[in-house]
């Protein structure tokens, strides 16, 4: 694990800090502005723990201004705008993202702590792909003609924009989530007010510049980084907001769902996960182990669908645990801009404390098979951790940690594996590994999850719907299913 910062990595970090301090602003109704009340957010580099910037923060008055602009966009017919014009607007944003992909990657790495190689190869390209994908939808959203009411009646449906939506996103994939929520709204003809997480505002605020440059009609997109307890809560409660989308913790999702329900607002929730990754004895063990490692340590385990539970059949349990521990100990943990970093820090001091608490539970309940290693001495670094031989009620198994901690569980039979995998509160994603197609398919069908991977893990595509069941929420992001949340069918009975 390297602790040495090369001159190249120092230069990259310095450039990122310069970008972060270069007058980033809120986007309100198409205009880049500072907070009306002068509120600000501190920005910390998780790789060092240092405060590297201060940016404007949305307060309640900024929320009200954004909602007023969005309501005006509805009144002025944004949703009725020629579909090809909406498509062209999204393609302009995609081109601007492509033009400034390096600046976005640098800000994403600085803000989240993820390796610069990942933000360059994964996060920013996915954001560009998202606008490209949704730019094809405005001309394909249409209703149906229904043969009903007799020959003198023409009955048909229209898919109409739901109104104004607020989309509240988390801190683990800021630019990708921001792109997805904005592009969904633009495709549906629904003005979007995006609230990025207060912990990671930078890439979304840079995106605000690009959206402003794309010259959209006033009020179509606003971007308001701020705290959940004031700006976020105000957005959900505001009478000018018609629909809500939220990705984040299950506890916050429950509160927002209660608020939205009391106001009869539709809400889509993508919440926590504790995804079981199930290895049958007849699987390709080497491939399964490699996938399990990336499944839990991608983005330092800060992925809703991280394979944080590994269920292994008796016959291969010891072999798998030994191999996993060796791979975890050999992983290169380092700062975001260091050469060769495989896993960066977690996002904040609070998140690091949470991870450390759960590692403590692992020591109490089972066997912690990895050491802290040669971690950097500053920043928010947690070691890749394997915990084995846990009782089934251990908090390391039942609760979402959102960090690089893998709980390995033993099972004997097919039915035992089903019971274990479905026994938790969550249902976002799962995986099964078996060379027996019948076993794998039966198990996939038995799992209670929004997504099941068979002999693979962490497969995603913008065109494929994403979401969970049980405590992992409801509604879907991505794919055509995501647009159902932002459109509503109107039925027209036309007497001829």
Image: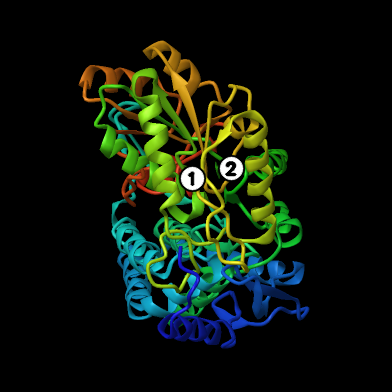
Q: Nearer the viewer, residue 14 or 84?
A: 14
Query: How packed is label 1: few (under 14 Cα within 10 Å), some, or many (20 or more)?
Result: many
Q: Secondary structure at mark 1?
A: helix
Above or below residue 263? Residue 29 is: below
Q: Residues within 10 Å of mark 2 (few under 14, many from 20)?
A: some
Specify the label residue 485 is tagged with.
1
Q: Residue at x 72, y 54 (%)?
A: 233
Q: For residue 457, which quarter of the picture?
A: top left
Q: Which residue is mark 2?
A: 266
- Does label 1 or label 2 sit earlier along the sequence? 2
Residue 43 against residue 357 in the figure, above or below: below
**Residue 257, percent from left and from top:** 66, 40
Report x, y in % for residue 370.
51, 44
Q: Is residue 316 above or below residue 222?
A: above
The residue depicted at 34 percent of the width and 75 percent of the height is 92
- In which quadrant of the rendered view does residue 254 lie? top right
- Is 264 above or below relative to 194? above
Can residue 407 be seen here? The reply is yes
Q: Quadrant of the C terminus?
A: top left
SS for tag 2? loop
Left or right: residue 44 compared with residue 371: right
């Amino acid at each position: 694990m390297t602790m040495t910062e090369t001159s190249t990595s120092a230069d990259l970090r310095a450039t990122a800090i310069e970008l972060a301090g270069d007058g980033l602003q809120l986007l309100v109704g198409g205009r880049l502005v500072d907070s009306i009340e002068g509120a600000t957010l501190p920005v910390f580099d998780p790789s060092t723990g240092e405060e590297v910037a201060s940016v404007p923060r949305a307060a309640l008055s900024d929320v009200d201004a954004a909602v007023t602009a969005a309501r005006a966009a509805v009144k002025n017919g944004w949703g009725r705008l020629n579909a090809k014009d909406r498509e062209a607007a999204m393609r302009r944003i995609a081109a601007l993202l492509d033009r400034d992909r390096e600046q976005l990657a640098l800000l994403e790495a600085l803000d989240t702590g993820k390796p610069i190689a990942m933000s360059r190869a994964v996060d920013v390209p996915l954001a560009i792909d998202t606008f490209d994908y949704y730019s094809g939808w405005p001309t394909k959203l249409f209703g149906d003609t229904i043969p009903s009411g007799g020959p003198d009646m023409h009955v048909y449906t229209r898919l109409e924009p739901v109104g104004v939506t607020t989309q509240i996103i988390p801190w683990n994939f800021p630019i990708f989530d921001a792109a997805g929520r904005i592009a969904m709204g633009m495709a549906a003809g629904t003005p979007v007010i995006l609230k990025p997480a207060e912990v990671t505002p930078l890439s979304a605020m840079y995106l605000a510049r690009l959206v402003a440059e794309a010259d959209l009609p006033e009020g179509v997109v606003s971007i308001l980084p701020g705290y959940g307890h004031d700006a976020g809560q105000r957005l959900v409660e505001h009478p000018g907001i018609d629909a809500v989308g939220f990705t984040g913790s299950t506890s916050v999702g429950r509160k927002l769902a209660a608020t939205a329900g009391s106001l009869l607002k539709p809400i889509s929730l993508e919440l926590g996960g504790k995804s079981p990754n199930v290895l049958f004895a007849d699987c390709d063990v080497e491939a399964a182990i490699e996938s399990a490692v990336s499944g839990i340590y991608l983005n330092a385990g800060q992925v809703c669908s991280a394979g944080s539970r590994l269920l292994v059949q008796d016959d291969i349990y010891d072999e798998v645990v030994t191999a996993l521990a060796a791979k975890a100990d050999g992983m290169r943990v380092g700062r975001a801009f260091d050469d060769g970093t495989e896993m960066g820090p977690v996002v904040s001091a609070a998140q690091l404390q949470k991870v450390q608490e759960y590692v403590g539970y692992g020591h109490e309940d089972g066997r912690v098979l990895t050491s802290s290693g040669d971690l950097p001495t500053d920043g928010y670094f947690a070691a890749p951790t394997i915990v084995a031989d846990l009782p089934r009620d251990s908090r390391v198994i039942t609760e979402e940690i959102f960090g690089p901690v893998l709980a390995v569980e033993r099972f004997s039979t097919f039915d035992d594996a089903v019971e274990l995998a479905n026994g938790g509160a969550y249902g976002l994603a799962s995986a099964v590994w078996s060379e027996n197609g019948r076993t794998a398919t039966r198990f996939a069908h038995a799992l209670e999850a929004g997504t099941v991977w068979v002999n693979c893990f962490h497969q995603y595509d913008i065109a494929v719907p994403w979401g969970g069941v049980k405590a992992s929420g409801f509604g879907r992001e991505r794919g055509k299913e995501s647009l159902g949340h932002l459109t509503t069918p109107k039925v027209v009975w036309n007497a001829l």
